[in-house]
Amino acid sequence: MDVVELARRLVEFHSVSNVSSKEIADFISNLLDSAGFSVEQQSYRLSDGVEKVNVIATKGGEGTAKLALSGHIDTVPFDEKEWRNHNPLNLELRGGRFYGRGACDMKGFLAVAMAAGMRIPAQELSAPFSLVFTSDEEVGCIGARKLVEEKGKIADMFVIGEPTSFQPFILHKGYIFVRINLRGKGGHSSEPAKGRNVIERALPQVIMRLNEFKSSLESIRDARLSPAYPTLNIGKLSTSRNAAKNTIAEECTLELDIRPIPGQDVDEVFDALRRYVAPEGDINGITVDMKLVRKPTLPFETSADADIVREAVAMTGKPATSTSFNTEGGIFNHSGSESVICGLGSIAQAHQPDEFVDERFLSEDFVRRYELLIRRVCGKKS
């Protein structure tokens, strides 16, 4: 099975984050097992009972891998009506581009990584090499968290194949997803004294304080990032299902994200926000309940002098730099690994209708580049 056929098989799996990843994980596991990898699956279930599976495949010895190529097997949802001339679950070549959900983010890279790893016999490796494929990256890096919580450090070095146009990234911000719920007392608008209107009593103050906190973050700088400071964005505001113009607003919810820079403690950032917005948990008789929607994703940084960075720069011929999107790199580095984000295709295509990756990336040339990386790091020296 060549790399294009392998990518086609992977794209055919409906593996959006809200369905089980068992089927695609089994396909990957069986294929890698037949190619001489020792394969382990880590299964877990979400709160709704849906089974998810991570795959760790290793050859060349036991214990902690010296190098792992890593990617996620889940994709974001898609609306087939928005795909103009392409079936999202069918990898199709048109005009020098391979179209399909996950072609860019990131089943194309999985296919290249698998093809590179499968062609190296175990006896030609002097140190263990792994392929590490995770579930639920798109909904908070849940699979990667499960892996390091259970197993700790999985590899000394990681290359994470998020779409970077084949440029090494060694720095990005973290991600904190916060929900603020305001609760008052409802009633009819003709009797305002009998209720506590959350929109009138608390919402303006909450937004003002969030904006003040946002402004304070701009004093914390890292010139390597763009923008160079932590950001805060209020992205969603909603009232209760029964809200109407003639009722007293009894509930309001805001959703926002904060993107902390390396060096910031995500728990401390959240605690500081909570203390600043509503230190008493109450504003003018309105209860203010602030919670993390999910565990924050850590900021990510690997030293430019790290061995894996030098290897990635040599492989790509491009300098290491920073990116604005979030990855599993912070999670793996926090476990003791050193990681580089370096994959195929452009991040501009991720999550889009008619997602595509340029034809050149699903080629023998790029399989060979990752194969040579594996051999340089883990191969026997002649």
Image (cartoon, rainbow, N blue to C red):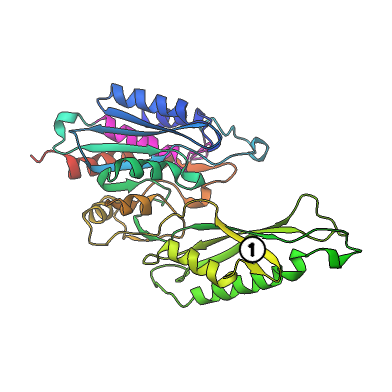
Q: Is residue 21 magenta?
A: no
Of 79 and 130, nearer the camera is 130
Quadrant in which the N terminus appears: top left
- Magenta-colored stretch includes residue 107: yes
Locate residue 303, reporting x and y percent.
27, 61
Label 1: state its secondary structure.
strand
Amino acid, disc 1: Val
- Residue at 48% x, 48% y: name it: 140
Where on the picture, by quarter, is residue 287? bottom right
Residue 365 or 343: which is nearer the viewer? 343
Picture layout, residue 57 above or below residue 82: above
Q: Where 76 falls versus 295 (above or below)? A: above
- At 14% from the left edge and 29% from the top edge, which residue is drawn? 123
Residue 363 can be seen in this image: no
* Residues rendered magenta in the picture: 93-119
Residue 77: percent from left, percent from top: 58, 39
Q: Is residue 87 rendered to the left or right of residue 160?
A: right
At 35% from the left and 44% from the top, the residue drawn is 149
Instruction: Return the x and y of residue 159 as percentages of the image width and height.
Output: 31, 47
Closer to the camera in the image, 284 or 117: 284
Q: Which residue is mark 1?
A: 288
